[in-house]
Image: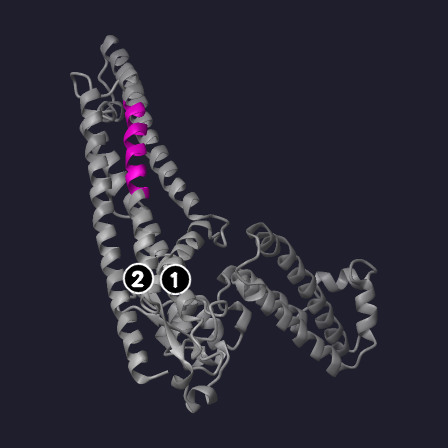
Amino acid sequence: MSLRERAEIRRATLAARRALEELDAAGAEELARLYGAAAERLRAAIARAAAGDGNLSLVEMRQVLAQVETILAQVTELRNATVSAGLSHAAALGAGAVLGTAAAMPVATEAVSFVRHFVAADGLMLSDRLWRIDRAAKAAIAEAIELAVIQGHGSAEAAREFLARGREVPPEVAARLGAANAARLGDQAAELMTGRGESALYQAHRVFRTEINRAHGEAYMAGAEDHPDFAGFRFLLSPAHPKHDICDLLAAQNLHGLGPGVYPSREKCPWPAHPNTLSYVEVVYRDEITDADRAGKETPMAALERLPAAVRAGVLGKGKAELFNEGRLRQGMIRAPLSKVAARIARTESSVAGQPPDTYAIAHAGGAHHGFLLRQRELPDHLIEKGMRSLQGQIDRHERWIAHPEEKVGKDWPPERVADLVEKKWPKDIARQQAQLEILGGIMKERKDGTG
């Protein structure tokens, strides 16, 4: 590849990335406008339905709830159109950075289709996520209105009874008399739509950013991978990346001898690492790989060791960072939840240094894995220790596959088959391997104690 061609692609890649950031900002502005307008329509609908005292009655509540559904359906339609336009634009930017116009169009179209049908590890597609936003907003607003009206209605009834008996209305009853106040309910509805935190607007922009990034990256990689001088994709952090997390490790590790953060194919590239990501990829060509890159091939654990302590703590979290510093964290635990890591370490360490675990006791008594126990007892220490290392490696690989199934089966497997592997088969394999590991630890414990 000529230096000129490479420079042109680099410039186009950077320009496309900047255009994507502008698209994200424009999308955020449009979504804020849509949800803000819907919030104001909700305020107006609640205010119009209120009685002369400014409170909603039970009858008026039903009218308002019907209007809530209409208003939310309208914002859903407009929001979905914004997302669709964003996907198409983002994919066109990605493909156009590495391909000519004619070649880029089908690649961009395919990337948009991929994003729409992509099933994440939680089993959800894009349409599912958008539907969940709408369902949650509708439920939260309806619940707020219903609860307030019922509380206000009940408090009014109670207040009348107190007054009829010539008694003073208790402060707690009086405080709830204005629960169904239209202005207050309007504020609540608007907060649920556009407020800080987990509002409908926040969730919509989170999905928008995640999916336009996915469309852009998939189109870019699909267009770049077929180049004859292609070597890999570099995982890059955005300058706006807010805090240290797993992305820092993915951008730093040199697992394939291609350089820090460079992965040899789309299947091997771990981008995107998480939703709402602020990270990118760029193509790397063969003549850009140096001898130092090839000599610097390393494991994820070695890459973690290289990271500054503060960055490593961000990647792992405080608890797992402490385990790493103590030498107790293994490669397969890097992306696992701390609770599972702690439980696994406890099981592993008890099998080596503590009492023989329950699994060993059951096998010793003739229960599950008894045949495995009898066979392994015939082996010398060094082979049992080798078997323990092998089983630990198998567990590490299976845990990695659960976190990143594409590493094992690729991207073309039917989602239901991938889900079966992630949710059933691989966890079952891990349980079997862990049981065998505990049995081998029990054998070694017996020999150490002189009881075997």
Q: Amino acid at mark 2?
A: Leu
Q: Position of residue 329 (x, y in %)?
A: 52, 72
The residue that mark 2 highlights is: 93
- The residue closer to the viewer here, 235 or 10, is 10
- Spatial CA span between label 2 and label 1: 8 Å
State the extent of the magenta-drawn residues as a range.
64-80
**CB contact under 8 Å: marks 2 and 1:** yes
Q: Secondary structure at mark 1?
A: helix
Tell me where residue 28 appears, x and y as whole percent. Answer: 24, 51
Q: Relative to residue 357, is residue 353 depicted above or below?
A: below
Query: Which is more toward the observer, 193 or 29?
Result: 29
Residue under the image location 28 percent in, 20 percent down: 63
Could you say where residue 245 lies in the image, as x and y percent from the top left? 38, 67
Q: Quadrant of residue 7?
A: bottom left
**Residue 71: within the magenta?**
yes
Residue 264 place in picture, x, y as percent: 47, 75
Relative to 287, residue 32 above or below? above
Q: What residue is pinned by disc 1?
A: 219
Residue type at numbered disc 1: Ala
| Quadrant location of the N terminus in the rendered image | bottom left
Colour pattern of the rendering: one colour
Q: Residue furthest front?
A: 102
In the foreground, 211 or 297: 211
Q: Is residue 59 above or below residue 140?
A: above
Q: For residue 134, say whether it is visible.
A: yes
